[in-house]
Image: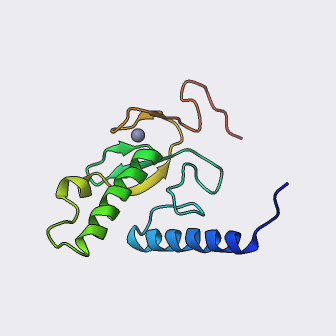
Amino acid sequence: MGTFDMVKWTREYDAKMARREAREARWPGLPFDFGGDLRHHTTMGGYPLLYLTRKDEVLCPECADAALRTVELAEHEALTDPDEGPSEWELDAVPTISGANYETPYDCYECSATIEAAYDSDEETTYG
Ligand SMILES: [Zn+2]
């Protein structure tokens, strides 16, 4: 059995909080989990999330997060080298909005993974 390392735990907690706060500030409106990664499911209801770029391309959470990391890295490099920085192409690939995927499975534009819908559209759903 390991012993609980409060110092290590606190340091990791602070690092996660800082990462989340930085990403929320950089990408307003996108949903991040505690550690600062894009959420895979809504906080309320746990519905699958999909992401849309400004060109209306559908992304899965992994590819959406990868697109953010690409731009973050380019912006970081631009701090020391003004010739660096994200390209228009890289900025086009970042998600600008997320939504719960209720009824229709979509394929991710980048990796073709299927983003499952919360409800199978083939099944009749009876409300009330
Ligand atoms: Zn993907």
Of residue 120 and residue 112, the one placed in the foreground of this image is 112
**Going by the picture, which residue comes out furthest to the left?**
83
Position of residue 28 relative to residue 44, above or below, is below
The quadrant of the rendering that contains the N terminus is bottom right
In the rendered structure, the answer to whether residue 94 lies left or right of residue 36 reads: left
x then y, percent, for residue 45: 66, 51
Q: How was this image coloured?
A: rainbow
Position of residue 99 relative to residue 72, above or below, is above
In the rendered structure, the answer to whether residue 44 lies left or right of residue 112 reads: right
The number of callouts visible is: 0
**Going by the picture, which residue comes out furthest to the front?**
2
User: Is any part of residue 77 visible from this angle?
Assistant: yes
> Which residue is pictured at 19% across the width and 58% down the height?
87
Of residue 115 and residue 10, the one placed in the foreground of this image is 10
Choose top left, top right, bottom left or bottom right for residue 121. top right
> Which residue is pictured at 25% across the width and 50% down the height?
55
Q: Ligand 1 lies in which image quarter?
A: top left
In the rendered structure, the answer to whether residue 19 lies left or right of residue 83 reads: right
